[in-house]
Amino acid sequence: MKIFVSNSPEESKKFAQELAGEILAGKRAENGALVLALMGDLGSGKTFFTQTFAEALGVKEKIKSPTFIIFRKSKVGNKEWREKGFENFYHFDVYRIHNEKEILNLGWEEIISNSRNIVLVEWADKIEKILPKNFVKIYFKHLKGDKREMMIL
């Protein structure tokens, strides 16, 4: 477990960028997507983290939560990430779903089985039963003001 406490949006941004760098430097699974499962209360920093992480990947589109459409797909633009074999960034926001079957009907199994994909899921605790075994769990907690705690489990 790794715990990071941020006192400002700038520190949170640095955390997301550093985590992206650590993931890029590490050995990646060849049998499926890189899946980051974000969990935590409303306002705890999940979307801000997602925006910063996507920026590190070189995603050109403005990142906003796909709450009503459930997910968005973007191209990975950063050369280093592309050289590692990553092509697509999927951003899921499953806040509005009622059960895992709703996600399965959107092609979830195909998306997470493709090793060229990076999949980031906000409110991932709602679909924890269908997350792949090797997912990265990040728990966000709003402490006070701009202060946030992020735990990588």
Image (cartoon, helix red, strand yellow):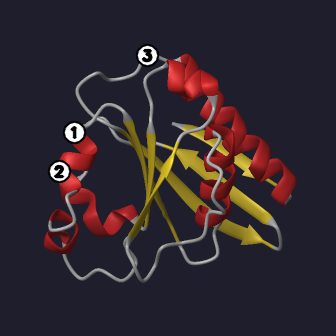
| Label 3 environment density (alpha carbons within 10 Å; few <14, some 14–19, many ≥20) | few
Q: Nearer the viewer, residue 35 or 78?
A: 78
The secondary element bearing badge 3 is classed as loop
Residue 132 can be seen in this image: no
Identify the secondary structure beneath mark 1: helix
At a point 32% along the width and 37% down the height, the residue shown is 33
Q: Are marks 1 and 2 in contact (CB under 8 Å)?
A: yes
Q: Amino acid at mark 2?
A: Glu
Instruction: State left or right for residue 105 relative to residue 150.
Output: left
Sooner in the amino-acid sequence: mark 1 or mark 3: 3
Kindly identify which residue carries mark 3.
27
Q: Which mark's residue is nearer the viewer, 3 or 2?
A: 2
The image shows residue 37 at horizontal and vertical percentages of 42, 52
Horizontally, residue 60 falls left or right of residue 25, namely right
Q: Is residue 15 above or below residue 142?
A: above
Q: Position of residue 126 (x, y in %)?
A: 30, 70
Q: Which residue is mark 2?
A: 109
Q: Earlier in the sequence, mark 3 or mark 2?
A: 3
Residue 55's x, y, as percent?
68, 47
Residue hosting label 1: 113
Within 10 Å of the Cα at label 2, are there few (<14), some (14-19), or many (20+) other Cα atoms? some
* Distance between mark 1 and mark 3 Cα atoms: 17 Å
Quarter-of-image position of residue 135: top left
Give coordinates of residue 59: x percent, y percent: 61, 47
Classify residue 63 by image quadrant. bottom right
Find the distance from the CA under tag 3 to the CA under tag 2.
22 Å
Q: Amino acid at mark 1?
A: Ser
Q: Which residue is located at x 37 percent, y 72 percent?
A: 94
